[in-house]
Image (cartoon, rainbow, N blue to C red):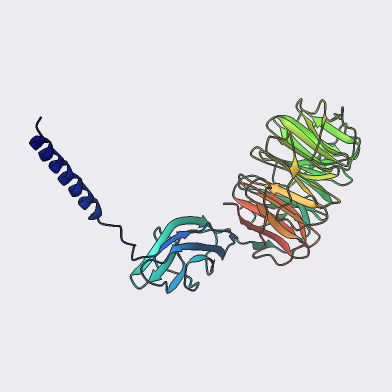
Amino acid sequence: MNLKNLSFLFLIALFLLNCKKKNKDEEPQPTPSPLPVVSTSAISSIGPFSAIGGGNVSSEGTSAITKVGVCWDVNPNPTTLKPNTNNGAGVGTFTSVLSGLGENVTYYVRAYATNASGTAYGNEVSFKTFPAWSLTYTNNPNYTCFAANDLKVFAGGTTGVIYSGDNGLNWVATGITIPVRTLLLVDTVLYVATTANGIYKTSNNGVSFAPVNNGLTNMNVYGMAVIGNTILAGTPSGVFKSADNGQSWSTSSSGLSNLSVNAMAAKNNKFYAGTWGGLFVSTDFGTSWTSVSGAGTDVNSIAVNGNYVLTSTFNNGGIYSSADDGQSFTIANTGLSITGPIALTANANKVYCGSYMNSGVFMSINGGAGWTAANEGLNGMSVYGLGANSNYVFVSIFNSGIYRRSAQ
């Protein structure tokens, strides 16, 4: 190749290089978005009529922000034409109070930010408000225990047992008028454990009762639980067992180092007994018992909820929770402000607790890992008893009455 050809090739390469550089220099640069950039925060502090939301403005766009807030509606993709808050202007995080909500309603929420170019919206989040309590019974209101299925509800206390056939909306007296400690509903049969007269049984919604105490040597029955055909009753003298629908009882306390039983519960073919010496579990229908560590030393109430087992104690106001079907327990008091003996109950996905020491009701949606107050609609804060079925939760408030709220 001669010098002339080399010079020609060099000129071509130089031309192409300059063209590439020129094209690169002429590539259009991205322009800032005229609208702000905003994201929506998770909803917290949810109640029947209000909640807390907010957002974060990370960019104001091409002009100053004049207004930020959240908007919400019962339909997706809400805009500022729907209920909204005004939380000032500028970039950064902000908190909003969503008020005027309806109870037990699903809402959709988006944060927004407005500048001269328009309004931008953040991601959508949704939540459901909780229901409020409604008073359904006021006559002789101090009841301490409940038993319920999907329609029938029984409440027991110092004046006996009352019955509701419509999920606790209306109540009538039954034939039991002596002090009652706890109740157990097995299909259509109700077992009533009294503080001094043993156990009674009714299959006609309390129109008539019959004692079922054969073999029961302690008439103070503090707790009952059932698995299949086996019923266990806890007393200050230990556990008694019946395999014939309560017609006969025999002692069943092997392994209990403390015989003073305050509460009973059952799930997944396990019986639990809460005693002054802690929690015990039986996997052989009460034939033998094993101590469970970490669940409190003076257990007065037990609730089961899915894989969770929760216990509460008499003296230190503590609640303990197990997420592994009772294998291990940890303290579960986050968000809880409560003292005195604690009542517990659970439905499909929530746990409730309360105490007669003016605590009000607390609710947990995560097996006791966190608690929030749930007192809207209650006239009084002294909780005497709690109960639940798949439809409603029931609470007895001292000198006020029985309240119910939706369990959904």
Whole-percent x, y for residue 74 in the image: 44, 61
Judged left or right of residue 179, residue 185 is left
Q: Quadrant of residue 29?
A: bottom left
Q: Which of 239 and 250 is in front in this view?
A: 239
Whole-percent x, y for residue 193 in the image: 81, 43
Total residue callouts: 0
Q: Which of 256 and 393 is in front in this view?
A: 256
Q: Is residue 84 at least partly visible in the picture? A: no
Q: Residue at x 76, y 60 (%)?
A: 359
Q: Which residue lies furthest to the front in this view?
A: 3
Give the quarter of the figure containing the N terminus. Answer: top left
Whole-percent x, y for residue 254 in the image: 87, 27
Q: Nearer the viewer, residue 264 or 355?
A: 355
Judged left or right of residue 236, residue 367 is left
Q: Is residue 128 at least partly visible in the picture? A: yes
The answer to whether 12 is drawn above or below residue 271 in the figure is below
Judged left or right of residue 289, residue 188 is left
Q: Which residue is drawn at 36% across and 68% down?
A: 62
Whole-percent x, y for residue 365 in the image: 62, 49
